[in-house]
Image (cartoon, rainbow, N blue to C red):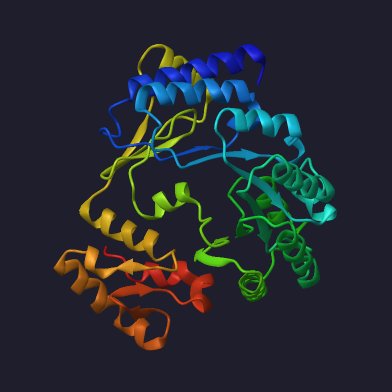
């Protein structure tokens, strides 16, 4: 993004905040998350401009968590210091793996030593809440390579780890490589074994497993992401950003120029999905059952509570679901196949 384009984008985001100031209906802003491509394209000063607009529009007196996503190769002492100066207190980094060969395969710009240095730089600067992303199920990733990834990650004293199985999105370079048989995807049973290895290692390293793909040291769960799983309304601004107000979802175009032009004309472009009662029921199940706390049956209307218990009975008897303290949850041993379990509970 050129300097002129970046300045135009920051102005558009600030204008969008003004145009949508009523979206949260006066609810306090407790978390901020700068993610996607934004942090790497904007300077800390420009992120600060947007933060000031949020503060002026919504107020930030209740802010507890301010996260910025960083690429390991972007992290320097000066960069982290500049982020701290605008209130950032949590850094999230897409490390993915500590194997240089696999980083090259993924097209990442950093190497393993840069990733290690980046985490250490954050800690030395006084950021005591660092999260890293890891991947498993990568072609060529052996059990030994994954074990090395886990050992390095836990040796770095990070407070949070998100770990995801490689997925092949339609039209992506990896998907085309698989179609052309230039790579072979890892079999499900091997991915399941990798998931179990990850869970066991992180438990032994003192991490709490609080969501299917997320692990934290006590007290360091992602407050921002947890709001998604709790169905808390949120406002997303910028190109491609999603928002949720409790009854509908909105998202803006990924096309940067289309987004900025529309905002400059005070006519934000959105696609929207209005959620029916069945949609809201299914979504509540999908989101809460991703967490280790599970679904609080007391939070459901009586008829919905009866429906979900009737539907879940067979799964409870098989051990695929646990019913404890009026909560329905998926045992950790079954979390790798959670999508299949949760989908059987949906209303149609």
Residue 75, picture quadrant: top right
Task: Report the residue that reaches farthest toward the left.
Answer: 302
- Is residue 39 toward the left or the right of residue 148 in the image? left
Query: Where 348 sits versus 79, above or below?
Result: below
The quadrant of the image that shows the C terminus is: bottom left
User: Do we see residue 268 in this rendering?
Assistant: no
Which residue sits at x=44%, y=68%? Answer: 292
Residue 251, picture quadrant: top left
Q: Nearer the viewer, residue 225 or 220?
A: 220
x and y, in percent, of residue 11 in the image: 49, 15
x and y, in percent, of residue 8 in the image: 54, 14
x and y, in percent, of residue 22 in the image: 28, 27
User: Do we see residue 254 in this rendering?
Assistant: yes
x and y, in percent, of residue 258 in the image: 48, 20
Residue 248, picture quadrant: top left
Which residue sits at x=77%, y=47%? Answer: 115
- Is residue 226 toward the left or the right of residue 195 in the image? left
Q: Nearer the viewer, residue 213 or 222?
A: 222
The mark total stands at 0
Which residue sits at x=54%, y=67%? Answer: 208
């Amino acid at each position: 993004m050129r300097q002129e384009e970046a300045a135009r984008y920051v102005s558009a985001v600030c204008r969008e905040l003004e145009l949508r100031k009523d979206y949260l209906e006066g609810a306090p802003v407790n978390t901020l998350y700068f993610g996607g491509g934004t942090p790497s394209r904007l300077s800390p000063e420009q992120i600060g401009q947007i933060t000031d607009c949020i503060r002026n529009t919504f107020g930030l007196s209740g802010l507890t968590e301010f996260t910025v996503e960083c690429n390991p190769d972007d992290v320097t002492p000066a960069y982290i210091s500049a982020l701290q100066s605008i209130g950032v207190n949590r850094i999230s980094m897409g490390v993915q793996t500590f194997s240089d060969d696999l980083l090259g395969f993924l097209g990442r710009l950093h190497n393993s030593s840069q990733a290690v240095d980046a985490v250490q730089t954050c800690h030395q600067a006084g950021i005591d809440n660092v999260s890293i992303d890891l991947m498993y199920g990568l072609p060529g990733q052996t059990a030994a390579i994954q074990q090395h990834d886990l050992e390095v990650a836990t040796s770095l004293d990070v407070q949070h780890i998100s770990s995801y199985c490689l997925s092949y999105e339609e039209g992506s370079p990896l998907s085309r490589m698989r179609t052309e048989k230039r790579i072979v995807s890892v079999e499900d049973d091997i991915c399941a074994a990798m998931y179990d290895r990850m869970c066991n290692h992180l438990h032994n390293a003192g991490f709490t497993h609080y969501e299917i793909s997320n692990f934290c040291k006590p007290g360091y769960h992602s407050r921002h992401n947890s709001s998604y799983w709790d169905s808390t309304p949120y406002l997303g601004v910028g190109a491609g950003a999603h928002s949720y107000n409790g009854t509908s979802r909105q998202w803006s175009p990924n096309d940067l120029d289309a987004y900025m032009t529309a905002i400059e004309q005070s006519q934000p472009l959105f696609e929207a999905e209005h959620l029916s009662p069945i949609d809201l029921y299914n979504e509540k199940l999908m989101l809460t059952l991703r967490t280790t706390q599970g679904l609080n049956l007391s939070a459901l209307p009586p008829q919905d509570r009866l429906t979900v218990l009737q539907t879940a009975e067979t799964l409870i008897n098989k051990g695929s679901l646990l019913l404890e303290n009026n909560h329905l949850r998926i045992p950790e041993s079954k979390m790798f196949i959670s999508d299949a379990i949760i989908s059987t509970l949906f209303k149609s």
